[in-house]
Amino acid sequence: MIEFAPPTVVLLVVWGTLVGLDLVSVPQAMISRPLVAGTVAGWLAGDVEAGLRVGVVLELFALDVLPIGAVRYPDYGPATVVAAALAAGAPWELGLGLSVGVALVLAILGGWSLQFVRRRNARAIQRRAAALAAGESGAIRRLQHWGLLRDALRGALLTGAGLAVVWSAARWLSLDRQTAVGLTLLAIGAGLSAAVGGAVRSAGRGARLKWLVAGLGAGTLMAVLR
Amino acid sequence: MTGRWRALLRLLAVQGTWNYERMLGVSMGYAAEPLLEDLKTVDPVRHGEAVVRSTEFFNCNPNLAGLALGAMARAEYEAVPGEQIARLRTALCSPLGALGDELFWAGLVPALVGLALVAAVLGAGWWAIVGFIALYNLVRFGTALWALRTGFDAGMRVGSAISASWIPWAVARIGPLAGAGVGLAIPVVAGWYLRGFGWAGALGALAVTGVGAAVTRWFGPSLTSVRFTLLAMGLLLLFRWAGL
């Protein structure tokens, strides 16, 4: 991991906060998709290529997730930002695997933190139950603003703590070349398996499955001819 | 800014207070506030009741929440009995959740992500990112605008308005597009990553893909793709540490 100037760290935390908010609370504009979060974080960290490489492989994992209703899922946004910062400055073949491993752990923590925020929201609503029953508009507004603030804080803490941990542990995270390449190949293979698994599950047995197979065929042809 | 535009902007944060008790309820109340403002001068008692109703339990896909919000606001202005509005609110949860999730989370998002991945690895770079964000948000904001307007115009007849709208048509067609988009992206992305590693490396990674897809399917939710990856990484580090 390269040393970042304080303004860069601040920008990364701000970006992590925004993508953390985007996942559920506001505005769900898809900036939290790893492809977007990673590329922008790589640009902020001074290495767009590393950010794109990290973002694309984590996007494969994210394609396995269907964020429906109350289901618990990993939060890849802030995790991708930290991973892109960790991968910046190193050859991607060596840095990608470790960064993806760190991102997956952070994504799980992000999923747990989302549950925590949801429980805190419920408690806040219970505390203001009387005001809500009386139809107080001020109480609704306060609940909404505090809910957004809680989620923003969650994204900031995840990104900030993630950056602090990988920065302080960077010297222990150095791997020999063979191990680093092995981790990268494993991360790519596992990412592809996540995308395949998610695609097959979503496809069922109808027309979508046929189109998935057609897409796979066309994609294979493109990959071979390139 | 008119009440409808303010409500539309507030709908962007309709999951701002998401919780396991009222789900979207309180944020729906927050979005309803500008729509119900005029009711305060016409019928203050009714306005108070409407505000209370607007914060009760509700859940659906956030991109279609405007249909319910508009319909319920219209019903409040038409002085429909409160119990009927509550029943409408409950009845809309499942269909708006199912249609919205199929259209956006299982359809539009994977379709556009698949195409953006292909464009990004083929060298489109930032254009792929900007195109993805622009296209998704164009559809998403267009849908939100349409949903709020349709809900408000239809009122208690919102169910018929949804059935007669473009939504069921789009839901039936977006799935195959998503399948094709993701299907196209997987081999292209694989080629992009594995080209530099030689045959042995590429075959090793593809073996991980095969094993991962098989075991995560076999063991289901207890072994997710994330757990499989972390387990495999842990084993690799252990073997390397042991000098194997």
Image: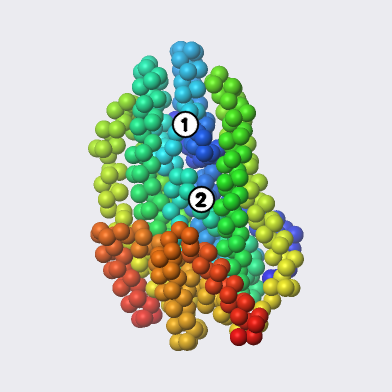
* Residue drawn 36% across the image and 26% down it: B87
Q: Which mark is residue B57?
A: 1
Give the image quarter of residue A97: bottom right
Distance of label 1 from label 2 (alpha carbons): 20 Å
Q: Amino acid at mark 2?
A: Arg
Residue B168 visible: yes
Give the image quarter of residue B67: top left
Q: Is residue A195 above or below residue A16?
A: below
Q: Is residue B134 above or below residue B90?
A: below
Give the image quarter of residue A105: bottom right
Compare residues A225 and B107 and report the one nearer the observer.
B107
Secondary structure under the numbered disc 2 in the rendered image = loop
* Residue drawn 55% across the image and 19% down it: A134
Task: Give the labeled residue for mark 2.
Answer: A72
Give how far across and how far down residue A145 sits, in percent: 61, 35
Give how far across and how far down residue A190 sits, in percent: 48, 71
For the C terminus of chain B, give its image quadrant: bottom right
Q: Say whether residue B91 is left or right of residue A148.
A: left
Secondary structure under the numbered disc 1 in the rendered image = loop
Q: Which chain contains the residue that carries disc 1?
A: B
Compare residues A127 and A77 and report the one nearer the observer.
A127
Q: Which colour scheme appears in the figure?
A: rainbow
Q: Say whether residue B195 is left or right of residue A179.
A: left
Q: Say whether residue B195 is left or right of residue A116.
A: left
Compare residues B196 and A40 and report the one nearer the observer.
B196
Residue B131 visible: no
Give how far across and how far down residue A2 sits, in percent: 70, 70
Q: Is residue A91 above or below residue B22?
A: below
Q: Amino acid at mark 1?
A: Phe
* Residue drawn 71% across the image and 62% down it: A165
